[in-house]
Image: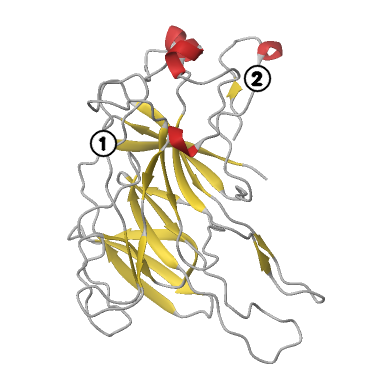
């Protein structure tokens, strides 16, 4: 993920940074939009966070089945920490660090390459069991991010954001994530075990989960999917749910009723329509600024 400095009034001085802001782990392609989110819930000046997920689908052809990126994929939220030039000329200030090894704890060109510089949230698939925790739910954690240069935690204040590894077999993100009310909403794809064979008369559709995560730390919201009916036909009512199985395709689309209830509206890869209530606290202090699409 590259960073460009466009703060100069002279376009000839616009330039890319000496190195990427962040580099994913091997085998994690970024093929969807990036979300730029400003959050004041991190303490101090608001931080500009870049949120995205990894995965890749190569479409089916007459000669070959659809293929997907291999290995473990993830969802990320990374702090764009170098706002010294911006803050010198703008009335809107963002939390910033000096581009030095002493301030960042990184080596020049200050690319974040190690997961040790990010706080890990953990997903756990509840693939068996009895209600209220049943199949079709992925639970998550809510670990605090100890930001680099801060005093957020008693020790270990050296983090530049968060990440969470996806846990479904082959699970990945091939649709653009969406910002909603302080959350990152994203539909994942779990490729069919048989994939699609061009010459086959039948196929097993892909599955997938709809995630709702706090943009500030990638953590869960309490009881984010209060009405989800699990694969056992029971309302899961799982307070620790990070995602539920909707088998939705495309980017998340949210409709808010006049009563204030938010609902994700979707259709599956087979064309079946569906909806799912999503419960996000209304006072989360974050906002989307813009996004960038990289190909």
Residue 24 pos. (x, y %) = 57, 41
Q: What secondary structure is marked by label 1?
A: loop
Left or right, 117 with respect to 139, comes to right
Residue 293 pos. (x, y %) = 60, 43
Residue 256 pos. (x, y %) = 28, 59
Residue sticking out furthest to the right: 63
Sequence-earlier tag: 2 or 1: 2
Say which of marks 2 and 1 sits in front. 2
Q: What secondary structure is marked by label 2?
A: loop
Which quadrant would the N terminus be assigned to in this image? top right
Q: Residue at x 82, y 76 (%)?
A: 63
Mark 1, residues whose alpha carbon is within 10 Å: few (<14), some, or many (≥20)? some
Marks 2,1: beta carbons within 8 A: no
Q: How many marks?
A: 2
Left or right, 267 with respect to 293, comes to left
Q: Residue at x 43, y 13 (%)?
A: 103
Q: Is residue 154 placed above or below 168 in the rendered structure?
A: above
Q: Is residue 258 placed above or below 284 in the rendered structure?
A: below
Residue sticking out furthest to the bottom: 201
Does any portion of residue 98 appear in the rendered image? Answer: no
Which quadrant would the C terminus be assigned to in this image? top right
Residue 36 pos. (x, y %) = 46, 36
Q: Is residue 292 placed above or below 230 in the rendered structure?
A: above
The circle on residue 18 is: 2
Residue for badge 1: 285
Rendering quarter of residue 258: bottom left
Q: Is residue 212 placed above or below 190 in the rendered structure?
A: above
Does any portion of residue 149 appear in the rendered image? Answer: yes
């Amino acid at each position: 993920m590259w960073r460009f400095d466009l703060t100069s009034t002279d376009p000839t001085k616009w330039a890319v940074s000496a190195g990427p802001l962040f580099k994913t782990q091997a085998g994690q392609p970024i093929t969807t939009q990036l979300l730029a989110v400003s959050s004041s819930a991190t303490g101090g000046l608001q931080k500009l966070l870049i949120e995205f997920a990894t995965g890749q689908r190569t479409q089916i052809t007459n000669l070959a089945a659809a293929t997907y990126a291999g290995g473990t994929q993830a969802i990320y939220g990374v702090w764009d920490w170098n706002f010294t030039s911006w803050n010198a000329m703008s009335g809107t200030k963002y939390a910033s660090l000096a581009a030095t090894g002493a301030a960042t704890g990184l080596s020049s060109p200050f690319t974040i390459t190690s997961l040790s510089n990010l706080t890990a949230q953990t997903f756990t698939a509840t693939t068996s069991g009895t209600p209220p925790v049943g199949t079709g739910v992925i639970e998550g954690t809510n670990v605090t991010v100890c930001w680099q240069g801060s005093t957020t935690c008693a020790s270990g204040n050296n983090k530049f954001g968060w990440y969470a590894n996806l846990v479904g077999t082959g699970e990945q993100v091939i649709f653009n994530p969406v910002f909603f009310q302080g959350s990152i909403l994203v539909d994942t794809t779990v490729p069919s075990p048989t994939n699609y064979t061009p010459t086959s008369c039948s196929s097993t559709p892909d599955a997938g989960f709809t995630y709702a995560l706090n943009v500030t730390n990638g953590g869960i919201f309490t009881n984010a999917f209060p009405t989800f009916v699990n694969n056992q036909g029971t309302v899961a009512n799982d307070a620790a749910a990070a995602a539920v199985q909707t088998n939705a395709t495309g980017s998340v689309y949210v409709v808010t009723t006049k009563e204030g209830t938010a609902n994700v509206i979707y259709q599956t890869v087979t064309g079946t329509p569906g909806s799912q209530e999503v419960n996000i606290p209304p006072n989360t202090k974050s906002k989307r600024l813009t996004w960038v699409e990289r190909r």
